Image (cartoon, rainbow, N blue to C red):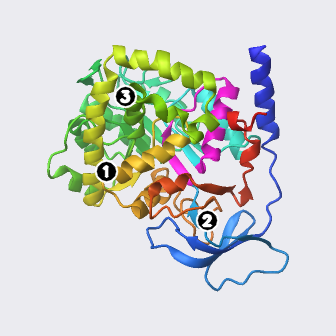
């Protein structure tokens, strides 16, 4: 019976993907927050044609016959972008589609999957790009690269411990055309995490430079400054996390900024565990209840919470979160580029991530750029995504309240558009929409 339900849900997800006709749309009289960091602009018109932004401004001429959306009293931001997720399911598409729909419901129009069953995630990516499923834009690594018996050695990881002998396996993964190639460069041995083997700096550098020589962007899982310094020296493009296990040295944030490294925030992954242990009532908020099954919520409150308590993750990650927030703020103040990511797979946690970044002391206007244009920069797609500018894809979120006054207002969603087509949030494959 359960299999039949999942099959039916998957079929509904596929049928729901049939694209609507891309109409010419004008959103008028709206306050525009374009994602570039420019201050909000009142009484703007955004003209969308053929799925892309055709014109933006106070004096845009709106042609006859265009669908008009009155944005008076509302606020328009770019579609949100979670630059670190792992789509659940490991082949179970019904679970994966529910997670992907939770992002659309939450105004997230692009995601980057930072390591997964390669056949599964690359299949979802292909179907999204062909319009066969309704989902956010999917960017993906497929199989991550790590050292044998190290962190991330499961799933369909590419294991490397010899140069150049293992480059054939690396090249096989690159043949899948990952949007970024993820590496895990981690020993742990701190707090709740036991020590694990990892790359030597020399081998790590050789493999990173091999991947870059093929024209593929790189992102690195690191958690401490020592590994982060090696990643900078190796020429890695981005990090999948900030330094999290302690404070950075005084000169290091400027070194990161000068290197051009883009750093994903990933504060929600720690906060999610801490809140589940300390006060799981956050699971009962309307947005969480909209996208999570009641049984999932109850399981997390009981079995999940007890598991976190038994291994000491609640207290350890409370400390880790504090260091991570401080390090994120130091990186921002030094001029480093931050991109928003949760290391989770649930749309509402993108809003929590934005709140946590703002709580670190970063202004809401900058948080919006971190969650939109900077995340597009992270995957190398800032030329056509991430901000509301002519020529870019019309991935847009219309809000009922001002997110610059309070970043929590990003959750006050009125409408979501992907490629100029409105997402019917009432038809997404989610608990909130079941009669």
Q: Nearer the viewer, residue 431 or 91?
A: 431
Provide the residue designation for mark 2.
Answer: 392
Q: Earlier in the sequence, mark 3 or mark 1?
A: 3
Above or below, 4 against 416 in this view is above
Q: Is residue 79 magenta?
A: no
Q: Is residue 86 magenta?
A: yes
Quadrant location of the C terminus in the rendered image: top right
Above or below, 435 against 388 in this view is above
Name the outermost residue toward the left.
250
Q: Earlier in the sequence, mark 3 or mark 2?
A: 3
Q: Nearer the viewer, residue 421 or 232?
A: 421
Label 2: which secondary element: loop
Mark 1 surroundings: few (<14), some (14-19) or many (≥20) residues within 10 A: some
Q: Which residues are magenta?
A: 80-109
Provide the residue designation for mark 1.
Answer: 360
The dot on residue 278 is 3
Label 1: which secondary element: loop
| Residue at the image position 69 percent from the left and 58 percent from the top | 419
Foreground tag (3 vs 2): 3
Alpha-carbon distance for marks 2 and 1?
31 Å
Q: Earlier in the sequence, mark 2 or mark 1?
A: 1
Alpha-carbon distance for marks 3 and 2?
43 Å
**Does the image show residue 172?**
yes
| Residue at the image position 69 percent from the left and 37 percent from the top | 432
Above or below, 213 against 376 in this view is above
Name the outermost residue toward the right.
65
């Amino acid at each position: 019976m359960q299999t039949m339900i999942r099959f039916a849900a998957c079929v509904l997800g596929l049928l729901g993907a049939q694209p609507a006709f891309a109409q010419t749309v004008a959103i008028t009289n709206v306050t525009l927050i374009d994602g570039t960091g420019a201050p909000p602009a009142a009484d703007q018109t955004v003209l969308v044609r053929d799925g892309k932004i055709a014109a933006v401004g106070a004096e845009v001429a709106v042609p006859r016959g265009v669908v008009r959306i009155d944005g008076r009293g509302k606020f328009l931001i770019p579609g949100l972008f979670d630059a670190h997720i792992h789509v659940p399911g490991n082949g179970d598409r019904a679970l994966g589609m529910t997670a992907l729909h939770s992002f659309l419901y939450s105004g997230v129009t692009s995601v980057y999957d930072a390591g997964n069953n390669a056949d599964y995630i690359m299949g979802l990516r292909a179907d999204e790009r062909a319009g066969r499923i309704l989902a956010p834009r999917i960017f993906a690594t497929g199989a991550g690269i790590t050292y044998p018996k190290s962190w991330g050695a499961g799933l369909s990881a590419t294991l490397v411990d010899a140069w150049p002998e293992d480059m054939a396996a690396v090249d096989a993964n690159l043949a899948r055309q990952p949007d970024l190639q993820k590496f895990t460069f981690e020993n742990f041995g701190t707090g709740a995490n036991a020590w694990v083997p990892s790359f030597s700096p020399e081998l790590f550098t050789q493999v990173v430079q091999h991947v870059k020589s093929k024209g593929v962007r790189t992102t690195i899982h690191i958690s401490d400054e020592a590994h982060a310094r090696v990643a900078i020296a190796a020429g890695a493009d981005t990090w999948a996390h900030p330094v999290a296990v302690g404070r950075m040295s005084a000169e290091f944030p400027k070194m990161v900024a000068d290197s051009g490294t883009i750093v994903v925030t990933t504060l929600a992954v720690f906060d999610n565990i801490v809140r589940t242990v300390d006060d799981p009532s956050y699971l009962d908020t309307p947005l969480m209840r909209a996208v999570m099954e009641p049984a999932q919520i109850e399981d997390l409150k009981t079995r999940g919470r007890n598991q976190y308590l038994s291994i000491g993750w609640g207290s350890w990650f409370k400390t880790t979160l504090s260091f991570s927030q401080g390090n994120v703020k130091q990186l921002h103040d030094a001029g480093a580029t931050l991109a928003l990511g949760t290391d989770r797979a649930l749309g509402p946690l993108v809003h929590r991530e934005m709140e946590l970044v703002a709580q670190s002391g970063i202004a809401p206007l900058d948080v919006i750029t971190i969650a939109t244009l900077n995340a597009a920069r992270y995957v190398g797609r800032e030329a056509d995504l991430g901000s509301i500018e002519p020529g870019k894809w019309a991935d847009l979120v219309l809000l009922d309240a001002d997110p610059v006054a309070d970043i929590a207002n990003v959750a006050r969603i009125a409408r979501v558009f992907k490629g100029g087509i409105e997402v019917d949030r009432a038809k997404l494959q989610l608990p909130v929409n079941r009669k």
